[in-house]
């Protein structure tokens, strides 16, 4: 995910899947970041690791290599 100003881009496996601009930039406010899991009828556990947040990132989309299981 690359969010810059009113533009948000999502890349999955090296493919740009969404490039969206908020048409009303005045609605953009500073706020906490949330990671969301949509509901499911089966109990789940979700873990996030190696999350990096960077302020003012370079305007570059990248796909990171997943860790290989040991």
Image (cartoon, rainbow, N blue to C red):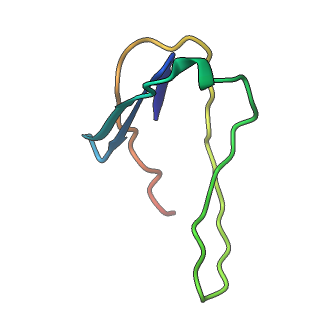
The image position of residue 70, as x and y in percent, is: 51, 63
The answer to which quarter of the image holds residue 51 is top right
Q: Nearer the viewer, residue 22 or 58?
A: 22
Is 49 on the left or on the right of 69, as rendered?
right
Q: Is residue 2 above or below residue 40?
A: above
Q: Which residue is painted at 63% across and 28% down in the image?
A: 53
Q: Which residue is painted at 43% across and 25% down in the image?
A: 23
The answer to which quarter of the image holds residue 46 is bottom right
Q: Which residue is painted at 29% across and 47% down in the image?
A: 13
The image position of residue 61, as x and y in percent, is: 34, 26
Q: Which residue is painted at 75% across and 34% down in the image?
A: 32
Q: Nearer the viewer, residue 33 or 25?
A: 25
Is 60 on the left or on the right of 36, as rendered?
left
Residue farthest toward the right in the current orientation of the protein: 32
Q: Is residue 53 above or below residue 58?
A: below
Is 30 on the left or on the right of 59, as rendered?
right
Q: Nearer the viewer, residue 60 or 36?
A: 36
């Amino acid at each position: 995910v690359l969010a810059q100003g009113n533009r948000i881009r999502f890349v999955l496996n090296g493919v740009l899947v969404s490039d969206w601009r908020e048409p009303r930039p005045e609605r953009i406010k500073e706020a906490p970041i949330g990671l969301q899991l949509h509901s499911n009828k089966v109990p789940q556990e979700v873990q996030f690791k190696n999350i990096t947040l960077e302020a003012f990132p370079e305007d570059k989309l990248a796909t990171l290599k997943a860790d290989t299981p040991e």
